[in-house]
Amino acid sequence: MGAAMNAARPQVTRFAPSPNGRLHLGHALSAIVAHDLARASGGRFLLRIEDIDGPRSRPELADEFRRDLEWLGLEWEEVPAQSTRLASYAAAAEALKARGLFYPCTCTRKEIEEAGAVPGLEGLIYPGICKRRAPDPTRPAAWRLDAERALAEVGPLTWDDALAGPQVLDLAGLGDVVLVRKDLPASYHLAVTLDDAADGVTLVTRGADLFAASHVHRTLQALLGLAVPRWHHHPLLTDGTGEKLAKRRGSPALAERREAGEDGRMLAQQLRLQHLSLGT
Ligand SMILES: [Zn+2]
């Protein structure tokens, strides 16, 4: 159903890997899904390198990623890497701070655990410690979204997933997420939302493990007046035991398979068939 609806107009999709580790089968599937949905609609498939994870980022991997995608038989347009967009993240963060929608948080993970934080959809739900205290200026601060204020400002919202259908916006399972990290001008949530809007992405494709994050991104789109895409969260590949293939120990990187002489286009076809069998 999703594919048929997407065919109505050309879609812009993207694959946005971080060069802090090699690509595995799960990444290949995400790239193929995004590529094929764009092609099926006569649209565009973009590659964006998400290279702002400071100490873990290995720029040389971006070249390896391009060779991997080529090996899989994909064609793409590359858009600027995240490291060139830091000013746009800082500007958006400053605007949201000025509107009272962010608050600084100096908590360590240990403090959050000791405060009795409960698990949510994306790790522990922050229990609001710093929302109720003045920040200690001598400690490094992250900036969190004040979910309560944000929801009061944007009102009831929905968003649409091509596979799961219409979703009612709900931040309860996420809490006050970090939007500016202690060490970076943005967290994943802020950067990816701004980038997708700047790149004109109309169909955000990614693995179902990031489904909950879309509630945060939809909130940010409303707060910042950004265009709202559709989403397509695809099922994750698993091995026989249900363990995520991308995380399986010993699963060879795409580059290793490529260098060993495996046929990448054949592998891409196998992934397409396996993906179909998962029900999409
Ligand atoms: Zn805090």
Image (tube, helix red, strand yellow):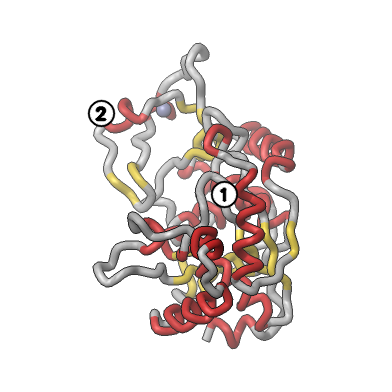
**Residue at the spot x=50%, y=48% of the render?**
21
For residue 22, above or below residue 70: above
**Residue at the spot x=74%, y=50% of the render?**
80
**Residue at the spot x=52%, y=57% of the render?**
23
For residue 115, above or below residue 59: above
- Residues 191 and 276: in front is 276
For residue 59, above or below residue 270: above
Residue 22 screen position, x and y as percent: 51, 52
- Residues 170 and 208: in front is 208
Q: Are marks 1 and 2 in contact (CB under 8 Å)?
A: no
Q: Amino acid at mark 2?
A: Glu
Q: Secondary structure at mark 1?
A: loop
The quadrant of the picture showing ligand 1 is: top left
For residue 129, above or below residue 14: above
Q: Within the image, what quadrant is residue 16 found in?
A: bottom right
Give the residue pinned by disc 1: 18
Q: Amino acid at mark 1?
A: Ser
Q: Secondary structure at mark 2?
A: helix
Rounded to the nearest whole Å, what is the CA distance between mark 1 and mark 2?
31 Å
- Residues 280 and 140: in front is 280
**Residue at the spot x=31%, y=27% of the render?**
110
Give the residue pinned by disc 2: 114
Residue 261 screen position, x and y as percent: 54, 69
Q: Which mark is residue 144?
A: none
Residue 253 screen position, x and y as percent: 47, 58
**Crowding at mark 2 (Cα within 10 Å: few <14, some 14-19, many 20+):** few
Residue 205 screen position, x and y as percent: 56, 67
Query: Which of the two marks, 1 or 2, is nearer to us in this view?
Result: 1
Q: Note whether ligand 1 is within 8 Å of mark 2.
A: no
Q: Note whether ligand 1 is within 8 Å of mark 1.
A: no
Q: Is residue 233 left or right of residue 71?
A: left
